[in-house]
Image (cartoon, rainbow, N blue to C red):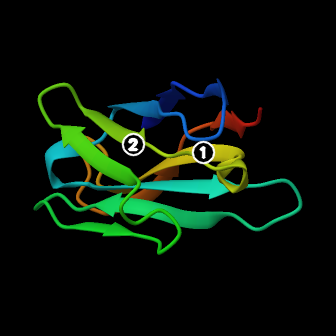
């Protein structure tokens, strides 16, 4: 069973920083591509950042230069360092993995439960 557990959300003032973490289990992590998405109230879920198994990164324009995605394959963790936070970054942030579970060769897309990030003074 694939599980993704996010942590690190909270309330931060504008201009502050947060680091989100996502712990993965049950998935062949080293060959999985990892993503962060977010969903603000009343809006659709949107892509934030991605990091493929071979190290390619991608970011939505809104966070380019402010956010950084990274991973630790040994710990099966993916991180999102968020700097220079703005009120419009307020959302629930979700971890997303695309890869094969243990014991299977087919790829699936899996989601965590999300962690709330609120940027407010």
Q: Position of residue 78 (x, y in %)?
A: 31, 39
Residues under numbered marks 2 and 1 in contact, where contact means CB atoms less than 8 Å apart: yes
Residue 72 seen by the camera: yes
Residue 28 seen by the camera: no
Q: Position of residue 92 (x, y in %)?
A: 69, 44
User: Between 30 and 17, which is closer to the camera in this rendering?
Assistant: 17
User: What residue is shown at x 26% (from left), y 51% (from top)?
Assistant: 104
Q: How many marks?
A: 2
Q: Which mark is residue 80?
A: 2
Name the quadrant containing residue 70: top left
Asked which secondary structure carries label 2, the reply is strand
Label 2 crowd bin: few (<14), some (14–19), many (20+), radius 10 Å = many
Compared across the picture, whether 63 is left or right of 75 comes to: right
Q: Position of residue 87 (x, y in %)?
A: 72, 49
Name the quadrant containing residue 35: bottom left
Q: Upstream in the sequence, badge 2 or badge 1? A: 2
Name the quadrant containing residue 121: top right
User: Between 24 and 69, which is closer to the camera in this rendering?
Assistant: 69
User: Between 61 and 53, which is closer to the camera in this rendering?
Assistant: 61
User: What residue is shown at x 16% (from left), y 54% (from top)?
Assistant: 31
Look at mark 1 in the image and give the residue it sits on.
Answer: 93
User: Between 25 and 67, which is closer to the camera in this rendering?
Assistant: 67
User: What residue is shown at x 48% (from left), y 34% (from top)?
Assistant: 17
Q: Position of residue 96 (x, y in %)?
A: 46, 52
């Amino acid at each position: 069973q694939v599980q993704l557990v996010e942590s690190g959300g909270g309330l931060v003032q504008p201009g502050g920083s947060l680091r989100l973490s996502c712990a993965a289990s049950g998935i062949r992590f080293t060959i999985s591509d990892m993503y962060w998405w977010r969903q603000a109230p009343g809006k659709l879920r949107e892509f934030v950042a991605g990091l493929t198994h071979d190290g390619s990164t991608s970011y939505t324009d809104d966070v380019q230069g402010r956010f950084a995605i990274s991973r630790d394959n040994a710990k099966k963790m993916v991180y999102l360092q968020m700097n220079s936070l703005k009120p419009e970054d307020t959302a629930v942030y979700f971890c997303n993995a695309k890869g094969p579970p243990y014991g299977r060769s087919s790829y699936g897309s899996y989601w965590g439960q999300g962690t709330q990030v609120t940027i407010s003074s």
